[in-house]
Image: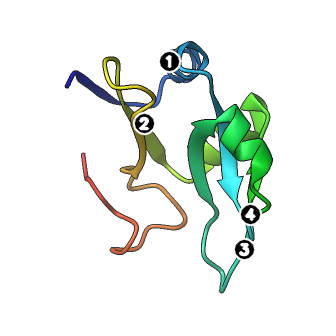
Amino acid sequence: MSISGPTTNHNEIRIWAESWKVVPTELLPHVLDHEPAELRMMLGEQARDRVDVKMLTWEEFFLKFDSLGLAFVYDDERAGYNEILQIEEKSPYRHPRYRIANT
């Protein structure tokens, strides 16, 4: 396994996603009990078939990604493996339950 990241570089994330044919998505509902939305990268065909997923434009995704203080981890060798992590101290949604890694 060749894990890369965490990264917040938009270009790096987009290039990786396009190479694995994954798209930026958001799990619905967008707001539940004042919790932040959950962003994910999913195969486009899977995202289109799910009613609980909203496909995002790259601009929408990165606006939410940055405002939530997230970072991206991925594997160049394992098909589509990725994680979106909460690492930024500045996130307005900082809560121990969301924090996976601190830098």
Residue annotated with mark 3: 31
Q: Are marks 4 and 1 in contact (CB under 8 Å)?
A: no
Q: Nearer the viewer, mark 1 or mark 2?
A: 1
Q: Identify the mark nearer the N-term, 3 or 4.
A: 3
Quadrant, the C terminus:
top left
Q: Position of residue 37 (x, y in %)?
A: 64, 63
Whole-number angstrom distance, CA of label 3 to CA of label 4: 13 Å
Q: Secondary structure at mark 4?
A: loop
In the rendered view, tell whether residue 43 sits above or below residue 19: below
Q: Are marks 1 and 2 in contact (CB under 8 Å)?
A: yes
How many labels were placed on the picture? Answer: 4
Whole-number angstrom distance, CA of label 4 to CA of label 1: 24 Å
Q: How is the image coloured?
A: rainbow
Whole-number angstrom distance, CA of label 4 to CA of label 2: 22 Å
Whole-number angstrom distance, CA of label 1 to CA of label 2: 11 Å
Callout 2 crowding tier (Cα within 10 Å): few <14, some 14–19, many ≥20: many
Q: Are marks 1 and 3 in contact (CB under 8 Å)?
A: no
Residue 63 seen by the camera: no
16 or 12, nearer to the observer: 16
In the rendered view, tell whether residue 72 sits above or below residue 54: above
Q: Secondary structure at mark 3?
A: loop
Q: Amino acid at mark 2?
A: Phe
Residue annotated with mark 1: 16
**Residue that appears at 77% across and 49% down:** 49
Q: Position of residue 97 (x, y in %)?
A: 36, 74
